[in-house]
Amino acid sequence: MRIMLHACCGPCLLEPWDALSADHDVRVAYANPNIHPRSEYEHRRDTLLEWAGSQGIEVDELAYDPGSWDRAVEGLEDRPGERCRACFQLRLGLVARHAAESGYDAVATTLTVSPWQDPDAIREAGTQACAEHGVEFLVTDFRERYGDATRRSRELGMYRQNYCGCRYSDDEAAQQRERRRAERAARKR
């Protein structure tokens, strides 16, 4: 099977790549118009490309068009679950179209390595996006490999981001970090 693997970042690519490329012809697609700001997009891309290049892995970078992401999540700013579903739909749709145009049979995603992502939402968005483009969505769940991906990426000195990617998740993650700091400070007192 020829699989187009959507990759969100280098650390999340490690384990899904190993799992899928062992038995399939896999090509990586970096399609992430959600990542904000552009410097963050480039940092994640460059980390992914550096590791992929060291392994001889081909990566297709799809156009960075944050306006398409803004339109996809318009009205969902304060509804994270729905906003994430729209984001998954957009990104996996871009990869599904690219896969179909490139003669690939299926699409998979590295998003399922993260324990913070909703695997059901990813499955639903991927299945719908791929059906629209006539390719199969390969349902995967790599969460059990998250620990290995984290360990390996640290050993490799890879850049590891502390938020999902969009400006809303950046704000939400910063608020969560601040709450945890405040809770730790309160316990120390």
Image (tube, helix red, strand yellow):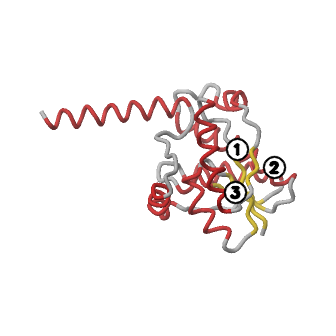
Q: Quadrant of the C terminus?
A: top left
What residue type is disc 3 on? Answer: Leu
Badge 2 is on which residue? Answer: 98
Which image quadrant is residue 76 in? top right
Q: Residue at x 70, y 54 (%)?
A: 127
Task: Tell whether 99 sits left or right of 33.
Answer: right
Q: Which of 47 and 168 is in front in this view?
A: 47
Badge 3 is on which residue? Answer: 5
User: Farthest residue toward the top?
Assistant: 75
User: Farthest residue toward the left?
Assistant: 189
What residue type is disc 1 on? Answer: Ala
Marks 1 & 2, CB-CB < 8 Å contact: yes
Marks 3 & 2, CB-CB < 8 Å contact: no
Q: Which of 22 and 86 is in front in this view?
A: 22
Position in image of residue 34 (x %, y %): 63, 35
**For residue 117, above or below residue 183:** below
SS at badge 1:
loop
User: Label 2: few (<14), some or many (≥20) within 10 Å?
Assistant: some
Q: Nearer the viewer, residue 126 or 7?
A: 7
Position in image of residue 148 (x %, y %): 47, 63
Badge 1 is on which residue? Answer: 31
CA gap, disc 3 and disc 1: 10 Å
SS at badge 2:
helix
User: Farthest residue toward the front?
Assistant: 54
User: Label 3: few (<14), some or many (≥20) within 10 Å?
Assistant: many
Position in image of residue 163 (x %, y %): 49, 39
Which image quadrant is residue 37 in? top right
